[in-house]
Image (cartoon, rainbow, N blue to C red):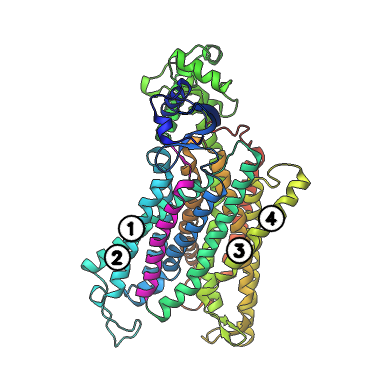
Amino acid sequence: MQLSTATFNSPTCTPTVQAFKFLIKSDRLPSLAFPFTVKGNQEDEAQVHVWEGYVDWKNRPAIKGHHGGMLAASFVLAVEVLENLAYLANASNLVLYLSKFMHFSPSTSANIVTNFMGTAFLLAILGGFLADAFITTYSIYLISAAIEFMGLLLLTIQAHMPSLKPAKCVMGNSKSVCGKIDGVDRVMLFAGLYLVALGVGGIKGSLPPHGAEQFDETTSEGRKLRSSFFNYFVFSLSCGALIAVTFVVWIEDNKGWQWGLGVSTASILLSIPLFLLGSHTYRTKLPAGSPITSMFKVLVAATCNNCKGGNSKNAIISMATSPACTNEREDGEEIKTRKKVLGQSQTLTESLKCLNKAVMGEVHPMLECTVKEVEEVKTVVRILPIFMSTIMLNCCLAQLSTFSVQQSATMDTMLGSFKVPPASLPVFPVLFIMILAPVYDHIILPFARKVTKTEMGITHLQRIGTGLFLSIVAMAVAALVETKRKKTATKFGLLDSTKPLPITFLWVALQYIFLGSADLFTLAGMMEFFFTEAPWSMRSLATALSWASLAMGYFLSTVLVSTINKVTGAFGHTPWLLGANLNHYHLERFYWLMCVLSGLNFIHFLFWANSYKYRSSTMPGY
């Protein structure tokens, strides 16, 4: 017979089912497929696999064979195409909208865009935290998509109604006085922008882990499919980006911003029913409470006990009998039940011994923590250096939307009879990623598995390291291309001219390809690494670190450019990156500096990666 909700909730269901209903509600089982028997009205039996810790969209226990799998993840991938289209369509061209229609200065417009994008990616941490602690990833996506829709709707209405914008004028024309946006109109603009940022943050923090949770990590096949999911998640990002930077940007430039914003609004709105369409297939992880609270509790307890000192040997001996050191603070019967199910218990490891003091000695009752919580904090501490190593790569990626576009604008952008807009240069890395992602997943990865005879083939840290190395090559290529571009300008006497240089912009496309490859390896590797290595209770938050790294990379780029100009200008020389004419910049020196910094960052990454030990257990929370 088929198990139904009525059967499961029936008062006549077997004591076995009643017992497991109690265990499910009280969170006493690991996330394993656990078979049990249910007797129906006709006394026939059925084997049902319940995934403890997971529920369906109606908050009922998720059942193996009915929930999860690649079908459920496919809905997530399709939704990500629409979501990234809605976000990037505006972010990629927003600086033009702010300067041309809202009459902000170029520098102010650039700062607004940088702050907007940085805030959106940083808010992914908030989305991940809420998904882990209080609300499911399923609910977070729906709430965040609704918030982003409201923000885009506000921006669309403002773009459509002339009364909500400054009067038209020609920027830079001394005869034309351009009024700046202010008052209610200004409030409406920034309210719309930051509602979009809040929505994007929630989606980026919840959608990738929601898709990754659909796979059974207790099997080799499930882990392989999860790895493929992260590869194709980057592929979906690129699909949305391709439509955004070509079709939607063309609409904004040629038909009007109200139409471009309208497409984005319709896109995010369409993503909601598409996401809901897959509801019956999803399995959703139950929130486990705030992981931040337990982390601070462990750190404070360890600090207090380290300050007190004491006999470590006696503390270690007493750990087995100390109530504060049990894996769970439960009564005797519950401990026996858990041990019977798990058949194992967790002990303290030798790494980061200073944190072991959190469960050694007496502390305030509010600071009492478990061995499990201590080991989870150790895991978080170990992945933080890897996270810090990825920020420099994203700083390099930030150059693709700034100096690289300006470089190509000075060059010959003709492809036959077609003129390529400089702002469409991101098409090159996007197309390259769309080609490389399936090739990597279906050719490179299976070959690596055969050669290494391992399940992963290429480890997460090897993927991240490959991306970091490619970023070094990309910056070296960028420096060489800039040197060639300036030599061409000097040779033809065009240093002070605004005419296009007789050199094709495809030279700049080389650095786009290298950085696009670096982005594919690193972003997919980061998301999978943070998701699989983080404690089960904070997987969404850990996965959001990938987006936080991107935000910090953008902010670091801004700080780096400002610092370089101050330092180089302080010695009586012209700042490297200042002025209206790019031909007078020392951009090649900046790229060489980025290359050196990326090299040092790569060495820093290797130091931590070589000493990193992957978690041996795949069971959630262990």
Q: Secondary structure at mark 3?
A: helix
Check disc 3 and give the amino acid type.
Met
Q: Nearer the viewer, residue 490 or 326?
A: 326
| Residue shown at the point (43%, 50%) measured from the top left | 124
Q: Which secondary structure is most common in the magenta stretch?
A: helix
Q: Secondary structure at mark 1?
A: helix
Sooner in the amino-acid sequence: mark 1 or mark 2:
2
Mark 4 or 2, closer to the camera: 4
Q: Residues within 10 Å of mark 2 (few under 14, many from 20)?
A: many
Q: Which residue is mark 3?
A: 434
Q: Which residue is mark 4?
A: 442
Mark 3 or 1, closer to the camera: 3
Q: Which residue is mark 2?
A: 154
Sooner in the amino-acid sequence: mark 4 or mark 3:
3
Q: Are marks 1 and 2 in contact (CB under 8 Å)?
A: yes
Sooner in the amino-acid sequence: mark 3 or mark 1:
1
Q: Which residue is mark 1?
A: 195
Q: Nearer the viewer, residue 57 or 460?
A: 57
Q: Are marks 4 and 2 in contact (CB under 8 Å)?
A: no
Distance from Cα at disc 4 to Cα at disc 2: 43 Å
Residue 78, magenta (yes or no): no
Sooner in the amino-acid sequence: mark 3 or mark 2:
2
Q: Nearer the viewer, residue 551 or 492?
A: 551
Distance from Cα at disc 3 to Cα at disc 1: 30 Å
Quadrant in which the C terminus appears: top right
| Residue shown at the point (56%, 21%) measured from the top left | 345
